[in-house]
Structure formats: structure tokens, C-alpha cells
Image (spheres, rainbow, N blue to C red):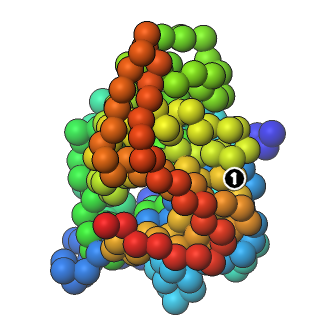
Amino acid sequence: MMNIKRKSILTAFVVLISTFCTTSVVSQDINSRGKLFIIGGGSRPSSMVDRIIKESGLDKGGYGIVLPMSSAEPDSAVYYAKGQFTKLGVDNIYGLQFSKDEKLTQAKLDSIRDAKLIYISGGDQNRFMEVVEGTDIEKAIHEAYQNGSLVGGTSAGAAVMSKLMITGNELKHPEYSSTFRNLETENIETKTGLGLITNVIIDQHFVKRSRYNRLLTAIIDFPELIGIGIDESTAILVKGNTIEIVGESQVVVLKNPKQSSKTYNDKLGAKGIIIDIYLPGEIFTLN
């Protein structure tokens, strides 16, 4: 692991950004909306990173930020995320770390609002939301998205995108497992996410870690939501209500249109579940 000085990331960022934009928020079209680039974890092929660059407009200028608060090693998370962009000729990527109960400055918040790309690292989605939930950081992310920025994230950074967030914990089986072994009522733990996409619930590493039971449980417990399971090295690009699959593997979409739910000794049952499996390049629409 690289030995990186913790303060160097933010210091360099603040110095460079002070020359990049004024202290006021850049005027943007408040009627436009941004895009979401939600990655299911794993490795990120260069073609995927290149797509992020083009969709965010970084190939034409501006800067991106990495929010590493999900990670237990935030400096390393920034280093490796930034490195993938640097290899493709984009150097204006900066780490911006926040801590819980930090006194927020206008300069740091404006750095979020004015970024063309906001990228949320992997790690633990609960750790990220403990820092940003209900704060001006969360508000700044939403403002950037509404004003046209691309908000992306991988693994834990994918989980936080939806309003209802899967924490990864089982209420009835507190010992951690990367996949659910049962379909049980009142077992899946959820918390509040960023809510950048409100009518779905996201799961990541989906095919690789066989997380079907977890997402099935979610759409039976919360039948008004659409479950989207994103495999590793794969992403969904969200533009309004249109979703495109980007990357190397599959995206599994689960729906419970009849809002069916039945229990027997805590075991879940449902009828009429719809499953669609999408491949790279395919597009679907959220109703």
C-alpha cells in the first residue's frame, strides 16, 4: 500500500480549486438534471472510466472529486480512483474527505456543488451515511446533481444512491455473510441513503456474490420498489428514467407488481415476481 500523507490530498485540492473557480457557486441551468453512474463493485475497466469522463464532460474541462468516506483507508481510496482517470489523461480529480460533526466551510461545500463529477468510493455504506446524512454535504451533492453533475459510486458508493439503502446486515443473523442464506421476513436491515434515485433499491456485487435472496427479500418487504442488482465490473448509467447497462457483466432487475407477500413460519412467499436480466449495451426504462 502506498504511503500517502493524509493532509496532502485536501491541501492540494483546496489550493488548486481556489484558482479553478470563484468563491461563488458557478451559475448553471437549475432546470437540468445530472446523471448517475452506479457501479456494482469489482474492477473498473478503462472503457468504463472513459465513459464516466465523457458523460460527466470532464473531457471538455472542469474537475471531479472523490468522496472516500465509505473507506477505512480514505487516502488510498482517493489514490487508486484518481489513478484510473490520470491514465486516461484526466488530472483534475481531487479527494475531498469529511468527518462526522466536522465544521463545514463554504469552500468545501462549493467544491462539491461545482464539480462535474462526484465519485463515491467503496467500503461501508453505513460509514458514509453516518458522515453525510442530514448535513449540508448531502444537500450539496443533491444540488450538484440537479444542476447537471454526474454522481457516481462503486460498491458501497452504489448502495448509497437509493433512498432506501441495504446496509448489508441481517437482523436475524447478525454474523456477517456476503450473501443471504434465507428468504425471511423482517430480516433485511435498511437505512436511509442519499435518495438520488427514489423508486429503486440497489444491490451490488450481485451475480458474483449470489445476492438474489437479499434483493428478493427487499422487493417483497418493500413491494413499491424495483430491485436492481448490479454485478461487478458493471454499471448502470441513469439519465432521467432511462437506464443503460455499461461494462462487462449483467444487471438483474426484480419487480413485485402485484405487491405480493405471504409468510409461513417467517419464510417469505410471493407470486408474480418479474425478473429481467440485462446485458451490456441494453437500455430499459423505469416506469
Judged from the image, the secondary structure of the residue bearing numbered disc 1 is: loop
**In this view of the protein, can residue 63 be seen by the observer?**
no
The C terminus is located in which quarter?
bottom left
Spot the residue most to the bottom: 60
Relative to 263, residue 120 above or below: below
Residue at x 38%, y 20% (from the top left corner): 263
Crowdedness of circle 1 by 10 Å Cα count: few (<14), some, many (20+)? many
Q: Residue at x 42, y 15 (%)?
A: 264
| Residue drawn at point x = 42 percent, y = 47 percent | 272
Q: Is residue 38 visible?
A: yes
State which quadrant residue 245 falls in.
Answer: bottom right
From the image, tell me which residue sits under label 1: 232
Q: Position of residue 157 (x, y in %)?
A: 51, 48
Q: Tell me if 81 is positioned left or right of 171 in this view.
A: right
Q: Amino acid at mark 1?
A: Glu
Residue 104, image x, y percentages = 28, 44
Residue lying furthest left: 31
- Image quadrant where one finds the N terminus: top right
Image coords of residue 213 (percent x, y): 56, 33
Left/right placement of residue 195 relative to residue 271 reads: left
Kindly indicate the quadrant of the structure image that contains residue 148: bottom left
Q: Nearer the viewer, residue 123 or 92?
A: 123
In-image side of 259 versus 267 (left or right): left
Task: Tell me the residue at 33%/51% (across/down).
Answer: 257
Residue 246, horizontal then vertical, whole percent? 62, 71
Front in this rendered view, residue 55 or 191: 191
Instruction: Give above or below for 38 relative to 42.
Output: below
Number of numbered labels in the structure image: 1
Camera-nearest residue between 241 and 72:
241
Horizontal side of residue 20 vs 22, given as left or right: right
